[in-house]
Image (tube, grey):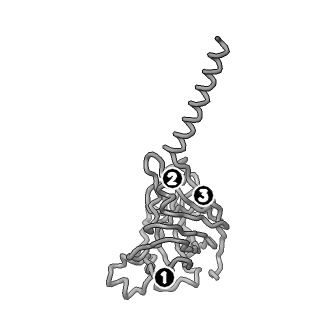
């Protein structure tokens, strides 16, 4: 009788453990991060399917289907003026739209400029009728990305530069609201689109591990671990 009770208790305990694991995987979504030299395949359908009980999606900015995303390079510059590939007009726009006052400077010190080269490959995605905005990338220190730190001691701006932006004359008429837009006709299924995004980052944070978050929601679900290359010369 005691043996039977022990067996029943063991089976019940095993069932409970399995149930906890299943529920844990269902309720809590673990972030998926790849290294810079790897492609990350993302689809709207899988994002929704793996959203868990609380609906944690990355809110990918296309209607349906799959995209492959790869970071080709990530270079760090001491000074924005060191980058010859960025025009003087673009540099002026960056300086005028990036707000970093003396109080910020006392808190975070001098800023570097991080230039990330990205390729998006359309595998089976339907982008829709509207132009797709390319500012759905945001870098975070890894401890902030995983929720182990609040990030108050780190400074990384939102994207302040997009190399394939529309002409400034056209943007000025639209109050610059479509600065980061790329025409959906430029990225048909089976084709790729390469571009660069720029971010300001404080020098201390630049020494830590940085993950480039992908998605428009507040949930850090997908990311690419960046391999920063310090470069004080012109970008090539």
- Name the residue that disc number 1 marks: 186
Of the residues under marks 1 and 3, which one precedes in the sequence? 3
10 Å neighbourhood of mark 2: few (<14), some, or many (≥20)?
some
**What residue appears at the point 46 percent right and 70 percent down from the top-left corner?**
135
**What residue appears at the point 37 percent right and 86 percent down from the top-left corner?**
170
Q: Residue 176: x percent and y percent?
A: 37, 78
87 versus 36 height, above or below: below
Of the residues under marks 2 and 1, which one precedes in the sequence? 2
- Name the residue that disc number 2 marks: 50
User: Which residue is at the front of the view, 142 or 28?
Assistant: 28
**234 lies left or right of 175:** right
User: Which residue is at the front of the view, 71 or 226?
Assistant: 71
Q: Quadrant where the C terminus lies?
A: bottom right
Of the residues under marks 2 and 3, which one precedes in the sequence? 3
**What residue appears at the point 52 percent right and 69 percent down from the top-left corner?**
199
The image's mark for residue 156 is none
**What residue appears at the point 64 percent right and 11 percent down from the top-left corner?**
1
The quarter holding residue 172 reads bottom left
Tell me if residue 194 can be seen. no
Alpha carbon distance from label 2 to label 3: 15 Å
- Which SS class for mark 2? loop
The image's mark for residue 33 is 3
């Amino acid at each position: 009788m005691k043996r039977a009770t022990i067996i029943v208790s063991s089976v019940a305990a095993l069932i409970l453990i399995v149930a906890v694991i299943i529920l844990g995987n269902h309720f809590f979504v673990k972030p998926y991060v790849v290294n810079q030299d790897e492609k990350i395949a993302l689809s709207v359908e899988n994002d929704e399917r793996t959203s868990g009980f609380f609906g944690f999606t990355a809110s990918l900015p296309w209607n349906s289907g799959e995209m492959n995303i790869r970071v080709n390079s990530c270079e760090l510059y001491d000074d924005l003026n060191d980058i010859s590939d960025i025009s003087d007009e673009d540099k002026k726009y960056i300086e005028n739209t990036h707000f970093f006052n003396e109080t910020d400077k006392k808190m975070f010190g001098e800023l570097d400029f991080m230039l990330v080269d990205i390729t998006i490959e359309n595998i089976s995605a339907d982008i829709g009728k509207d132009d797709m905005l390319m500012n759905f990338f945001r870098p975070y220190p890894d401890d902030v990305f995983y929720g182990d730190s609040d990030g108050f001691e780190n400074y990384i701006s939102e994207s302040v530069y997009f190399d394939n932006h529309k002409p400034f004359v056209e943007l000025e008429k639209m109050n610059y609201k479509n600065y980061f837009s790329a025409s959906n006709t430029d990225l048909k299924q089976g084709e790729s689109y390469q571009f660069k995004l720029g971010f300001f980052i404080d020098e201390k944070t630049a020494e830590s591990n940085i993950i480039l978050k992908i998605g428009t929601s507040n949930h850090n679900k997908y990311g690419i671990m960046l391999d920063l290359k310090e470069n004080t010369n012109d970008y090539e």
